[in-house]
Image: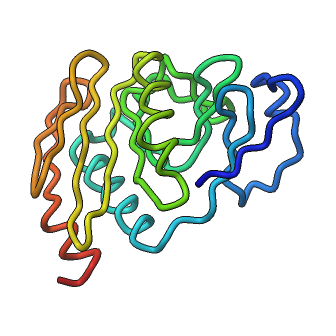
Amino acid sequence: MNSIMYASEPLTTKEFFALDVDEKLKVELIGGALAVSPSPRPWHGFVANRLRRFLSDALGRDYIVFADLDVIIDDENTPRPDLFVVSRATYDPDKVSRAADVLLAIEIMSTGSRVNDRLVKPGLYRDAGIPSWRVERSGERLLLVEMPINGEAETHHDSATLKVDGNDVRIDLAAMAAEVFGV
């Protein structure tokens, strides 16, 4: 379960960025409250690295795939997706990404972030117009849940070809799981 710290009044994005927080901590602003997640398990990092590589290779130089950085959704929400994609045309090395620039957000569900990854963040992304994916582990299998802006979530097993800004991205979940879990 996430550790969430509430102030007497919700924090704003501006107040959030003024805090002196250790950058090694995964601290997010969710609904004006600080949400702190524990470090993920190694499989989580392995999947994030593989997905980042797959996305970068499939999308090419016109897109940038970031890992674990802030995205400003609105004045009370600044989540840190495990991965997200922006167009190189909107990239600014000195500015925090904004929802309008994010083409895809990906969460890799960990034990300490189930509620936020399954319920809270997908709603934030959808309301901000950001399609999202969630990767879940089931034993030694990986599932990918595609959450479009409009429509119902769709769960993919073994493999999927998904769209990112009109580009096809093939994800071989079975091969990734075999690599991650050594099966």
x and y percentages locating residue 80 in the rendered image: 57, 42
x and y percentages locating residue 1 in the rendered image: 58, 54
x and y percentages locating residue 72 in the rendered image: 62, 26
> Viewer-proximal residue, 37 or 94?
37
> Viewer-proximal residue, 101 or 135?
135
Q: Quadrant of residue 30?
A: top right
Give the residue drawn at x 37%, y 27%: 103
Q: Quadrant of residue 87?
A: top left
Give the residue drawn at x 11%, y 41%: 161
Give the residue drawn at x 41%, y 41%: 118
132 w.r.t. 50: above or below: above
123 w.r.t. 1: above or below: above
> Viewer-proximal residue, 63 or 50?
50
Please say which color scheme the image uses.
rainbow
Relative to 7, 34 lies left or right: left
Q: Residue at the bottom extreme?
A: 182
79 w.r.t. 124: above or below: below
Give the residue drawn at x 58%, y 29%: 97
Relative to 26, 148 lies left or right: left
117 w.r.t. 158: above or below: above
Relative to 180, 96 lies left or right: right
x and y percentages locating residue 146 in the rendered image: 24, 36
Report the quarter where the C terminus lies.
Answer: bottom left
Relative to 35, 41 lies left or right: left
Q: How many marks?
A: 0
